[in-house]
Amino acid sequence: MSQLEGRADGILAPNLDRLARELTVQEAVLSYVWALGGRVFTAGHGEHLEDDASDPMRTAMRQMRGVFHQLDRGLIIKRLTEGRAAKGERGGYAYGAPRFGQRVDDGELTDDEREKAIAETFEH
């Protein structure tokens, strides 16, 4: 980051899937950074260079990685959705952390009287 200008010269991410898990978002972010004259680096790859008409393979390989990151995200969502549905079919609460004022006891969603009392003091 340039101390004089107060702006970043580029971005650094662990890898492209931490930058974006959807190909269209990945490509939009990269295009935007490059349009501003910035550079993009990932720990696993180094610098991701701007697209170059003389090297279409560069773009294709980057986008292919993006496609597989998007697929991985989709598969994770599918597994989580199926797991929640299976847990719900067996009975019990299966949808993440309950809201403030509730808790899960033996797989069932119940009121947490202490938290509920706290919440009620802020409602009035």
Image (cartoon, helix red, strand yellow):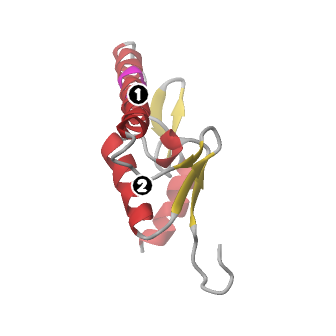
Residues 65 and 93: in front is: 65
- Residue 43 position within the rendered picture, expressed as x and y whole percent measured from the top left: 65, 43
Mark 1 crowd level (few <14, some 14–19, many ≥20, 10 Å Cα): some
| Residue for point 53% across, 45% down | 112
Q: Is residue 114 visible?
A: no
Q: Position of residue 57 (x, y in %)?
A: 39, 34
- The picture quadrant where one finds residue 55 is top left
- Residue that badge 1 annotates: 68
User: Which of the image's four quarters has the N terminus?
Assistant: bottom right
**Foreground residue among 95 and 102:** 95
Disc 1 residue type (three-letter): Phe
Q: Which residues are magenta?
A: 76-80
Is-magenta flag for residue 73?
A: no
Question: Does 98 sit left or right of 28 as displayed?
Answer: right
Which residue shows up at 43% across the image and 38% down it? 58
Q: Position of residue 81 (x, y in %)?
A: 36, 25
